Structures are given as structure tokens and as C-alpha cells.
């Protein structure tokens, strides 16, 4: 996710490769970073990174954040803006661990890799308007951004954070249906993928509610209404809603673990 965010910053001219610094303990990843971002700086430690950068994206596993913060007391200051994409770590924990209240939490999703992500952002009370705007511009470079409350980040996690998995399962199922109906695997996957992509773009570009667009393609006694009737009987709609809510509840459970 860190490389996706950096890619977005460079593509959108928010930063040059030479203005971006990374810290990573994986040597293979370091070589990849040098290749993708010519002229970027690779810090030898988190302390070095914090000493030369004021805006830092914490793109690390949640369970490692507390340990990282424990060694930064000498270099961290109020000048630092911290943006955490670690799932489940509340703003209060981040403020306590890092000793600064200029903290923003972001829940992005994997399509950020293609600059088509969806991210929800929530900030600590002491984060400034400029902090919020800069964070919003950074994640707008890799997709769409919505501002939410911290509590609503659980809903963002269940909807868009985990959402790509639901859509991928749907593409896979649509493709399987095409194969069952006689299409080749390649043709079925091409058609299924483009159908999902094209429909999503149509919703965005028209600004029309999905239900209205669905009605426009549903002819009386036609093929689409036959399919929709079958999907409704199978609980397609309620299954997706239940899936989102299951992910939301799991997100809340993880947050409670870190609050113990």
C-alpha cells in the first residue's frame, strides 16, 4: 500500500520521487523502491526517517506500531503529521504512543494500486485544516476520498476496505456462469470484468441511483428480470449487506483488542 500511495503522489505531481523517503527492513522491498522511485531516500531506521520528514504515512502492520513508537521519543515533535493506515488502531492509541496529536487515520483499499481506490479519513481533534487537506489530496491521488468520523471507519472497513473481495467474488461467479453457459474461460472473464467496471463508471458519471439504472435495463418479461428474480430468491442483496456488517463487527472486535 505504501508504494501505491507514493505512486499516486508522483503521478499527481504532489511530490517528486526524490522528495519521498522510505523506511523498510525488507531488502527486496528496498530494491523495488529504488527501482520504482528513482532518487528516493531510504532511511536506515524509523528514527532517521522521523528526523528528516514531517509528514509520515504509517503503512505498517497494526501489531508493530506500538514498538515503532517506543523508540521515537527523542525525534518526534509537534511538527510531525502522522497518517496511519493500520486497521483497528484508534486515534487515542496513536496519540498516546507517538506523543503528538496531529494524527489522521485512513482506511484505504487495494484498488489504490491502480489509482482507483476508495478511502475514508478521520482526524484527531488537534489535526489542522491544512493537515486534513494535505491528507485528502494525497489519497485523492489514488482514488476517491470521503471524510468520516472515527467511529464510521468501521463502516468504511466493512464496505470499501473489505469490499474489493466481494466484487472479486462476484466477478469470479459471473465468469463461472458464462463458462457454464458455454463461453471460454478467457471470454467469460473479459466480459465479467468489463461489465463490473463499466457499470461502476456509469454510476459515477451519471450520478444516477443504481436502482434507477437497474430499472432502465430491466424489460418486462425479459432476461434481466428473470435473473434478478432468481438472485432475490437466493438472498443476493441481503447476503451482501450481511457480509458488510460481519466485516464491520470484526473491525470493532479488533479495535477492542488494541484498547485493552
Image: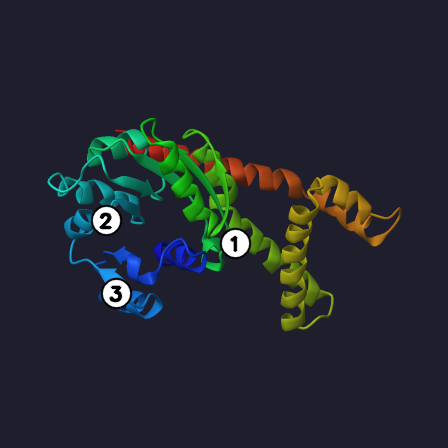
Mark 1 or mark 2, which has the lower sequence index?
A: 2
Asked where in the image residue 254 lies, by quadrant, the reply is: top left
Left or right: 120 as drawn, with respect to 1:
right
User: Could you say which is closer to the camera, residue 231 or residue 107?
Assistant: 107
Quadrant of the image containing the N terminus: bottom left
The x and y percentages for residue 84 are: 33, 42
The x and y percentages for residue 238 are: 63, 37
User: Could you say which is closer to the camera, residue 137 or residue 206?
Assistant: 137
The x and y percentages for residue 159 are: 52, 41
Mark 1 or mark 3, which has the lower sequence index?
A: 3
Q: What number is the disc on residue 116?
A: 1
Classify 235 as above or below 180. Answer: above
Q: Residues within 10 Å of mark 3 (few under 14, many from 20)?
A: some
Q: Residue at x 68, y 61 (%)?
A: 177
From mark 2 to mark 3, how far is it between C-alphas?
18 Å
Q: What number is the disc on residue 92?
A: none
Left or right: 225 as drawn, with respect to 105:
right
Residue that mark 3 sits on: 30
Residue at the limit of the structure toward the right, as seen here: 220
The x and y percentages for residue 17 are: 33, 62
Residue that mark 2 sits on: 53
Q: Residue at x 70, y 39 (%)?
A: 209
Mark 2 or mark 3, which has the lower sequence index?
A: 3
Nearest-to-viewer mark from 1 and 2: 2
Q: Residues within 10 Å of mark 2 (few under 14, many from 20)?
A: some
From mark 1 to mark 3, how far is it between C-alphas?
25 Å
Residue at the limit of the structure toward the left, as seen here: 74
**Element under label 3?**
helix
Q: Residues within 10 Å of mark 1 (few under 14, many from 20)?
A: some
**Element under label 2?**
loop
Residue 88 in view = no
Q: Residue at x 28, y 66 (%)?
A: 39
Amino acid at each position: 500500500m505504501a508504494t501505491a500511495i507514493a505512486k499516486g503522489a508522483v503521478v499527481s505531481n504532489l511530490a517528486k520521487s526524490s522528495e519521498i523517503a522510505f523506511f523498510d527492513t525488507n531488502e527486496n522491498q528496498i530494491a523495488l523502491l529504488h527501482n520504482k522511485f528513482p532518487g528516493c531516500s531510504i532511511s536506515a531506521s524509523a528514527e532517521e526517517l522521523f528526523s528528516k520528514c514531517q509528514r509520515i504515512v504509517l503503512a505498517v502492520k497494526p501489531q508493530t506500531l506500538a514498538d515503532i513508537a517506543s523508540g521515537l521519543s527523542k525525534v518526534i515533535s509537534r511538527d510531525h503529521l502522522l497518517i496511519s493506515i493500520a486497521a483497528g488502531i484508534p486515534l487515542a492509541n496513536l496519540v498516546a504512543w507517538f506523543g503528538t496529536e496531529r494524527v489522521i487515520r485512513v482506511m484505504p483499499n487495494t484498488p489504490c494500486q491502480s489509482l482507483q481506490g476508495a478511502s475514508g479519513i478521520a482526524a484527531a481533534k488537534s489535526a489542522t485544516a491544512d493537515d486534513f487537506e494535505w491528507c485528502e489530496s494525497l489519497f485523492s491521488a489514488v482514488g476517491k476520498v470521503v471524510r468520516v468520523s472515527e467511529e464510521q471507519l468501521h463502516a468504511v472497513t466493512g464496505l470499501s476496505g473489505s469490499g474489493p473481495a466481494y466484487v472479486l467474488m462476484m466477478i469470479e461467479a459471473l465468469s463461472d456462469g458464462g463458462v457454464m453457459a458455454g463461453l471460454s474461460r478467457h471470454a467469460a472473464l473479459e466480459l465479467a470484468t468489463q461489465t463490473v467496471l463499466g457499470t461502476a463508471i456509469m454510476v459515477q458519471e451519471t450520478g444516477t441511483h443504481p436502482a434507477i439504472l437497474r430499472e432502465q435495463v430491466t424489460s418486462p418479461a425479459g432476461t434481466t428480470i428473470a435473473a434478478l428474480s432468481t438472485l432475490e430468491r437466493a438472498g443476493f442483496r441481503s447476503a451482501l449487506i450481511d457480509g458488510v456488517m460481519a466485516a464491520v463487527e470484526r473491525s470493532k472486535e479488533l479495535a477492542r483488542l488494541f484498547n485493552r
